[in-house]
Amino acid sequence: MTCRPGLAALMLAAAPLAAQQPQLMGHDQSMADHMRQMEQMMAPMMRAMAFTPDHLLARKDSLNLTPQQVTRLTALRDAAQSTHDAAAAEAKAHMDGVGQALMVATPDTGAVKMHFQAAHSAMGRAQWAMLSAAAQARGVLTDEQRARVDRWANMMMDHPMEH
């Protein structure tokens, strides 16, 4: 019977938790788990995105970019941006189509699927344009410049809320 004081303390500590709204219990944990999973999946791509031409051009002075590097990065940025914008516009149009297809009383799942898949494909093309430009931009930099950007990316990934 020496467990009773511990049991009583546990019950007192648990009372505020039990008073929480049951429909919300677990929601925060589920959201946190989902965000953690998305972060893990996106981390490699986010690290690479530190090398997008626009990010590098914004830091041209601290990276000591040469005029030739600035010219090459500007061309990469402009080409990637136009491809990205066209694909993003297509994705938006198809997401609008998903929304419209779902607004009827009995949605046609075939139409929803077609718009969803087309939007997903367009979003992939938009992301690929930026990722491809980042990979090419990485090759424009010197070893020292790449190392500096890698350090910045590592700091951002290790301490995301501080920047």
Image: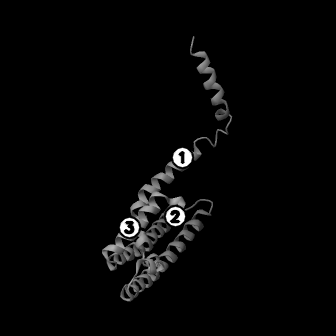
Q: Which amino acid does label 1 sit on?
A: Ser
Q: What is the secondary structure assignment of the residue under circle 3? A: helix
- How many angstroms separate mark 1 from mark 3 (CA)? 32 Å
Q: How many labels does the image show?
A: 3
Q: Where is residue 71 in the image (x, y as percent from the top left)?
A: 39, 88
Q: Which amino acid does label 2 sit on?
A: Val
- How many angstroms separate mark 2 from mark 1 (CA)? 27 Å
* Earlier sequence position, callout 3 versus callout 2: 2
Which label belongs to residue 30?
1
Which label belongs to residue 150?
3
Q: Are the residues tagged 2 and 1 within 8 Å (C-beta)?
A: no
Q: Which amino acid does label 3 sit on?
A: Asp
Q: In which quarter of the image is the N terminus?
A: top right
Residue marked by disc 2: 112
Give me the residue at 49% from left, 65% from top: 116
Give me the residue at 44% from left, 80% from top: 60
Q: How crowded is mark 2: few (under 14 residues within 10 Å), some or many (20 or more)?
A: some
Give me the residue at 50% from left, 51% from top: 34
* Earlier sequence position, callout 2 versus callout 1: 1
